Image (cartoon, rainbow, N blue to C red):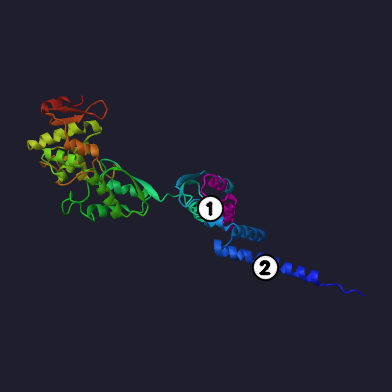
């Protein structure tokens, strides 16, 4: 009677045990390297995806090009993960689209890729890129300060700017600058020196840093030529900026700023009051009914407001700037038009231009009918 060998059976048993061990152990190895698998994967998916991730580890952990330049990568709304993966490979940002897609599915990140613009680099690993695609919020924001804004208006723009700065924190920093520049006298706020412009800032910028950046930009534009121009008008930097802040609020059109500056400089030269409406508006503060910091129109009662900023009652310049002037307004004060004008008023043609006059009688004649 023949004896049947049990070797094939034992071999099959060992192979089965080995296969089972692999099915159980390989996902554990992958989880140690790439995080826990998505709970929505089947057992077979966990095994096959984990095996692929481990076999193609270099596709995920080695950058495509360590010295590669950054580029903007745009993901459209509703775009599939497969399409995104293929485009990333075509753009030279990742090594293998298939491995990248498997990693996204394994981690569950495939369900939370956001549409938007991303700044990516082939010097990033595929894993870093996968996580970057979870947040389309840029690391920097564009912050705009408009010419003629007072510091409260800058503060009011912060809640929708993307910066993590409260209006209160900004105003506190602007009223008492941390590092006082040479052009600001002791105890002065930054009003007038928060230079208008468009700024690209990290979201982490603090209130103190924002004020410092705006002041540094003013300092950058404070050229020797601008200082010399102020000196020719018998003005140092601080009063020069005060006058420029008034010119900024009076002028609708930039090309009229030199003429308006000449009017105020002519008045200062003979000790005549400036009679500037914007200084009254600044003194009045926020108008709740109108929803603005610049009350318009002004009433006769408004012109009697008790304030050192009321240039209808006080001669000379107000004690500080009333807005943050543009470079053109600063240049208008430094290089005013040479005129004999002492008066100006808005024209009646709704163009935003002004009618200028040398005498009060001419000024009256320029009134609208």
> What type of secondary structure mainly makes up the magenta span?
helix
* 98 in magenta: yes
Q: Are marks 2 and 1 in contact (CB under 8 Å)?
A: no
Quadrant for residue 107, please give it.
bottom right
Quadrant placement of the N terminus:
bottom right
Whether residue 72 appears in this view of the structure is yes
In this picture, which residue range is highlighted in magenta?
A: 84-112
What x and y, as percent, mark residue 13?
A: 75, 69
Above or below residue 90? Residue 353 is: above
Horizontal and vertical percent for residue 69?
A: 44, 47
What residue sits 24% from the left and 45% below the top? 220
* Callout 2 secondary element: helix
Secondary structure, mark 1, is loop
**Picture quadrant where residue 367 is located:** top left
How many badges with numbers are in the image? 2
**Is 148 left, or right, of 140 in this rendering?**
left
Q: Classify the position of the C terminus by image quarter.
A: top left
Q: Is residue 127 left or right of residue 159?
A: right
Residue drawn at the location 16% of the way across and 40% of the way down: 303
Q: Which residue is mark 1?
A: 112
Task: Give above or below for 208 relative to 235.
Answer: below
Rendered location of residue 73, percent (x, y): 48, 45
In reply to whether residue 101 is colored magenta, the answer given is yes
Residue occupied by mark 2: 21
Vertical side of 140 occupied by 24: above or below? below
Residue 268 on image: x %, y %: 10, 37
């Amino acid at each position: 009677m023949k004896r049947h060998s049990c070797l094939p059976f034992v071999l099959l048993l060992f192979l089965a045990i080995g296969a089972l061990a692999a099915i159980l152990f390989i996902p554990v190895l992958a989880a140690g390297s790439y995080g826990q698998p998505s709970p929505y994967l089947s057992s077979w998916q966990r095994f096959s995806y984990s095996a692929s991730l481990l076999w193609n580890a270099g596709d995920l952990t080695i950058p495509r090009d360590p010295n590669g330049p950054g580029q903007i990568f745009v993901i459209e709304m509703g775009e599939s993960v497969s399409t995104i993966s293929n485009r990333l490979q075509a753009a030279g940002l990742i090594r293998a689209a298939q491995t990248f897609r498997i990693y996204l599915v394994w981690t569950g990140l495939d369900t939370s890729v956001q549409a938007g613009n991303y700044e990516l680099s082939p010097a990033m690993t595929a894993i870093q890129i996968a996580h970057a695609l979870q947040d389309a919020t840029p690391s920097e924001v564009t912050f705009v300060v408009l010419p003629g804004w007072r510091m409260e208006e800058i503060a009011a723009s912060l809640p929708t700017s993307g910066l993590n700065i409260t209006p209160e924190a900004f105003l506190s920093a602007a009223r008492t600058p941390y590092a006082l520049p040479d052009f600001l006298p002791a105890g002065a706020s930054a009003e007038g020196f928060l230079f208008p412009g468009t700024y690209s800032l990290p979201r982490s910028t603090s209130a103190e840093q924002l004020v410092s950046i705006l002041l540094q930009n003013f300092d950058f534009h404070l050229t020797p030529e601008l200082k010399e121009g102020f000196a020719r008008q018998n003005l140092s930097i601080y009063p020069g900026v005060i006058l420029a802040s008034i010119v900024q609020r009076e002028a609708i059109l930039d090309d009229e700023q030199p003429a308006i500056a000449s009017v105020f400089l002519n008045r200062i030269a003979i000790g005549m009051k400036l009679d500037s409406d914007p200084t009254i508006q600044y003194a009045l503060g926020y108008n709740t009914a109108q929803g603005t910091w610049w009350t318009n129109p002004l009433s006769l009662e408004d012109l009697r407001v008790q304030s050192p900023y009321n240039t209808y009652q006080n001669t000379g310049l107000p004690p500080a700037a009333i807005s943050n002037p543009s470079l053109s307004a600063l240049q208008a004060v430094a290089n005013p038009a040479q005129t004999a004008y002492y008066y100006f008023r808005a024209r009646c043609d709704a163009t935003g231009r002004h009618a200028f006059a040398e005498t009060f009688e001419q000024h009256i004649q320029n009134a609208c009918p």
